[in-house]
Image (tube, grey):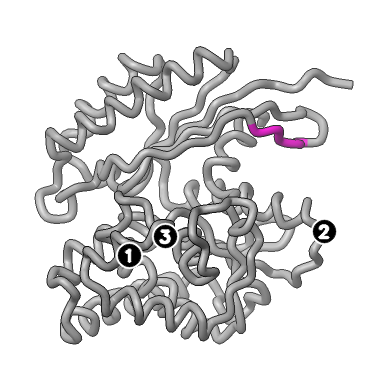
Amino acid sequence: MSEPKRVAAVDCGTNSIRLLVADLDPETGKETELDRRMLIVRLGQGVDATGRFADEALERTFAACDEYAAVIREHGASELRFVATSATRDASNREEFFAGVRARLGVQPEVITGDEEANLSFRGATRALADSGSGHPTPYLVVDIGGGSTEFVLGSDNVLAARSVDVGCVRMTERHLRSDPPTLEQITAAKRDIDAGIDLAAETVDLAEAKTLVGLAGSVTTLAAVALGLREYDRSRVHLSRIPIDVIRQTCADLLAMTRDQRAAIAVIHPGRVDVIAAGGLILAQIMDRLGLPEIIVSEHDILDGIAYSVLD
């Protein structure tokens, strides 16, 4: 029997930076989670408008890297992979970001393509579904709603098609949902952008082939926690929960009608997601309306787990 390999994975997105430290069995791929955490750093603050990282966003991100470096040292992980996604692809001053991460974690951030992002998300999510033995029909459509982009990945045992589009909760909030609460005109404009993104994804991914919709990442898991009526966030309740489409529609409508203070009063919404969760809900509702599937299955395993598994390759 082979010895497990202790690895660390960092996923740095537009809104959050997340860490996973886990023992992985090289033969079976079985994951034993040792530490999983998230910090909202809003690295993509203003990138859509300015094309560069804000100084304060870099400061927040580097502080998170300092914290994660200590955790990785404490657990003695033998390998680390650091993946950066949508916001980093767009920023003109990304070399400053790279240098700061290298100084703190000793690795070069990998700026992956949308297709690579999609493949890692699919791998992380579908392994959890397979391990659950729940027998959900395939092909799966895995949807990863991030801050700057959304990934659509269709597949069964392997990825059949994937597309990343520049529709995310931070991007849609900054571009459209500026009022508190947003106006009908703003919501309508955001829907047009989201629908255009879905159209773009459909050019590559045959959405009609999907039999099971799987949702990933903070917007989706937070929406699930709100929809389930949880008083505090509980990963075990959220993971593999099944949320009907009409519940998603109503949750989205409720969040869009709320003021920022009203959303902030909902305990399961992380303070860093209060500003952008309504846009995340709108993106998910529009996707579900397009697909016509009755429900979404929510996974707490996502690109972060896929990054960790990739270290075994």
Residue stretch in magenta: 29-33
- Which corner quadrant of the image does residue 201 belong to? bottom left
Compare marks 1 and 2 and give the one earlier in the sequence.
Answer: 2
- Which corner quadrant of the image does residue 160 belong to? bottom right
Main SS of the magenta part reads: strand
Do callouts 2 and 3 mark residues in contact (Cβ within 8 Å)? no
| Quadrant, the N terminus | top right
* Mark 1 vs mark 2: in front: 2
In this orientation, which residue lies closer to the viewer: 183 or 79?
183
Q: Position of residue 187 (x, y in %)?
A: 23, 80
Q: Identify residue for label 1.
A: 167
Q: Residues within 10 Å of mark 2 (few under 14, many from 20)?
A: few
Q: CA distance from mark 1 to mark 2?
A: 32 Å
Q: Residues within 10 Å of mark 1 (few under 14, many from 20)?
A: many
Residue at figure coordinates x 41%, y 32% from the top left: 110
Q: Is residue 234 left or right of residue 251?
A: right
Q: Identify residue for label 3.
A: 219
Q: Identify residue for label 2.
A: 133
* Mark 3 vs mark 1: in front: 3
